[in-house]
Amino acid sequence: MVELEELPSVGEKTAQKLRDAGFADMMRLATATAKELAVKAEIGEGVAEKVIEAARKAEQIDFETAFDVMERRKEVGRINVGSNAFNELIGGGIETQSITEVFGEFGSGKSQISHELAVTVQMPLEDGGLDGECVFIDTENTFRPERIEQISAAFELDHQETLQKIHIARAFNSSHQILMAEKINELIQSGTDIKLVIVDSLMAHFRAEYIGRESLATRQQKLNQHLHTLQNIATTYNVAVFLTNQVQARPDAFFGSPTKAIGGHVLGHASTYRIWLKKGLAGKRIARLVDSPHLPEGECVFKITSEGIVD
Ligand code: GTP
Ligand code: MG
């Protein structure tokens, strides 16, 4: 481990500024942009550039071979969604080092799956968990501890203990949401073993605050920044990021689905896995994998019960 003070051009004062701004480890620094670092740590952009370059050297960031990538992929953990068919559809569960996005109409099960994952991530590896804790960014005020109690009971977990390991951030607006995501770095650096970050829902505030064509570019820029933060956490700390998203009607669609996820290309490119949730008959739900780097498209059926998500 290289300490901040060991970097050339970093004195005690700069090191403190960097720590205060949440850039306490080399990887975090190495993957920052000069602009971001300059603004957040309140240092000159020139200094920021130097610091980042030094951190990259310290972390030996360079081209890597496909073998290295393969080795890192071996570290990927998977979190049980509750339904075997659902797990199979997405290659064994929600992956770490990636962003998984579910989108669908109201009541399609996005928040229910979020609650389920907040519990299952805490379970031991052999039971489909990652033995870790969870951050839940709740933008719609729909997080319900009672649901966590019920789902914990179904897995025979102590619900008090389970609740202790879910770190809730109620985001009041999009800026607050962006800020809370950035604070996750500090939480992890202080020793909390976060293995899952949930944002339910990603777009609600952005959608409400940036209305009209003229504000779209600004919205997408902010969203991009937010997604960059989340992706950074996923890769730096081997964490799974789970986002829920709303849909908009496509009255012009003659072919394909009559609805589409909001967030545009910025979000489409950021999510590694995209899953479309639909309501079926008799309380059934359908999950359709619409985008994945290495899995075929496909569908599965699951159900929401008081015990959580089941086949
Ligand atoms: P929005 O946030 O409104 O866009 O929807 P969402 O996709 O987040 O929906 P959510 O996950 O909240 O799903 C709500 C649905 O889950 C309800 O309509 C119920 O059908 C179902 N549900 C929630 N709790 C329970 C429960 O305890 N038992 C059963 N059987 N179903 C439940
Ligand atoms: Mg919801």
Image: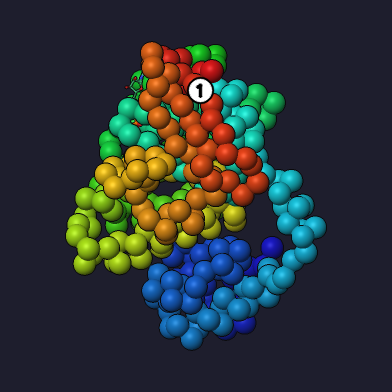
Q: In which quarter of the image is residue 300?
A: top right
Q: Which of 104 and 7 is in front in this view?
A: 104
Q: Which residue is drawn at 68% across and 70% down?
A: 61
Q: Which residue of the protein is positioned furthest toward the right in this rendering? A: 67
Percent across and percent down for residue 96 are 60, 44
Q: In this view, does 254 lie above or below 233?
A: above
Q: Locate residue 171 relative to residue 271 in the image: left or right.
A: left
Q: Is residue 118 above or below residue 135?
A: above
How many residues crowd around disc 1 within 10 Å: few (fewer than 14), some, or many (20 or more)?
Answer: some
Q: Locate residue 76 relative to residue 250 in the image: left or right.
A: right
Res. 264 in view: yes
Percent across and percent down for residue 94 are 57, 37
Percent across and percent down for residue 28 are 56, 63
Q: Which residue is drawn at 53% across and 46% down?
A: 291
> What residue type is disc 1 on?
Val
Q: Is residue 159 above or below residue 46?
A: above
**Image quadrant of ligand 1?**
top left
Tag 1 residue? 301
Q: Which residue of the protein is positioned furthest toward the left in this rendering? A: 212
Q: In this view, does 59 lie above or below 242?
A: below
Percent across and percent down for residue 87 are 59, 29
Q: Locate residue 69 relative to residue 53 in the image: left or right.
A: right
Q: Which of 5 and 197 is in front in this view?
A: 197
